Amino acid sequence: MGIFSKGKERYLNSVEWLSKNSIHLSEPAECKPQEFEFLRHIVKDKRIVWLGENGHNIREHNMMKSKIIEFLHKEMNFTVLAFESGLAECFSANELKEEFTDEDFLKNAIYSLWATKENLSLFQLMKKSDLSLIGIDINPSSNPELFVKFVQQLSSVVSKDVIEKIEYIEAGAYKWYYQLGQYTARRKNTAGQ
């Protein structure tokens, strides 16, 4: 019995410590920008702020991160948002964002995993401000034609031959990543049997 009561005591002490040493925020749906004022002191001299999560596709995480990013942009002048998504797709979508609806901008730029309604406000913000999107993953993330569309718009400064070579390389890279994904999925499926 003593071991269990000591474990429970340590747990309760940890909960108490966390409660005293945490900044309490409203629920994600009700959280207001002024609740992030504490960040002003914490990131005042920082150029890069990383926002993570303990699991993908958790609605509340996406909601809070979107609100934090909006605060960092509007109140602290951060101007670049790096997503764990394809380099080419994020760059191309950012350059072509005026051609897209808000939803299409979101869906064309990043992995479908992140393309949720909770992140839509970020893409709306990027369309109407100087907040720019970049990707930090070499894997393609969305539309295989997006980078090619961007490159085709450069026809006044890039030769047709170079554009055709880029199209060929992009198609090959996308096919390779697709096949790799199919192989990985089959392996996982076989391993689970």
Image (cartoon, helix red, strand yellow):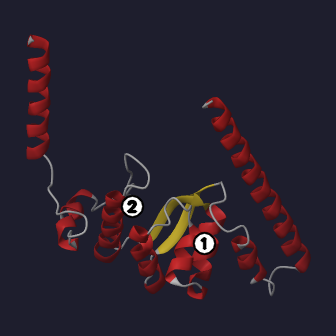
The residue carrying pointer 1 sits among few (fewer than 14), some (14 to 19) or many (20 or more) residues within 10 Å by Cα, namely many
Q: Which residue is mark 1?
A: 108
User: In the image shown, does 73 or 107 lie closer to the viewer?
Assistant: 107
* Residue 23 appears left or right of 103: left
In the picture as drawn, the residue positioned furthest to the right comes out as: 161
Residue position marked by numbered label 2 in the rendering:
47
Q: Callout 1: helix, strand or loop?
A: helix
**Image depth: mark 2 or mark 1 in front:** 1
Where 122 sits versus 17, above or below? below
Question: Does label 2 or label 1 sit earlier along the sequence?
Answer: 2
Q: Which element type, helix, strand or loop, lies under badge 2?
A: loop
User: Total label count?
Assistant: 2
Say which of 88 and 157 sits in front.
Answer: 88
Q: Residue at x 31, y 65 (%)?
A: 68
Q: Is residue 121 above or below residue 185?
A: below
Judged left or right of residue 68, residue 146 is right
The numbered disc on residue 127 is none
Identify residue type, mark 2.
Answer: Arg
- Name the residue: 57% across, 87% down: 98
Location of residue 89 with respect to 8 vertically, above or below: below
Q: Position of residue 110 (x, y in %)?
A: 56, 65
Q: Amino acid at mark 1?
A: Asn
Q: What's the residue at 71%, 78% (across, down)?
A: 150
For the residue pair 55 and 160, the one nearer the viewer reads as 55
Disc 2 and disc 1: Cα gap in Å? 27 Å
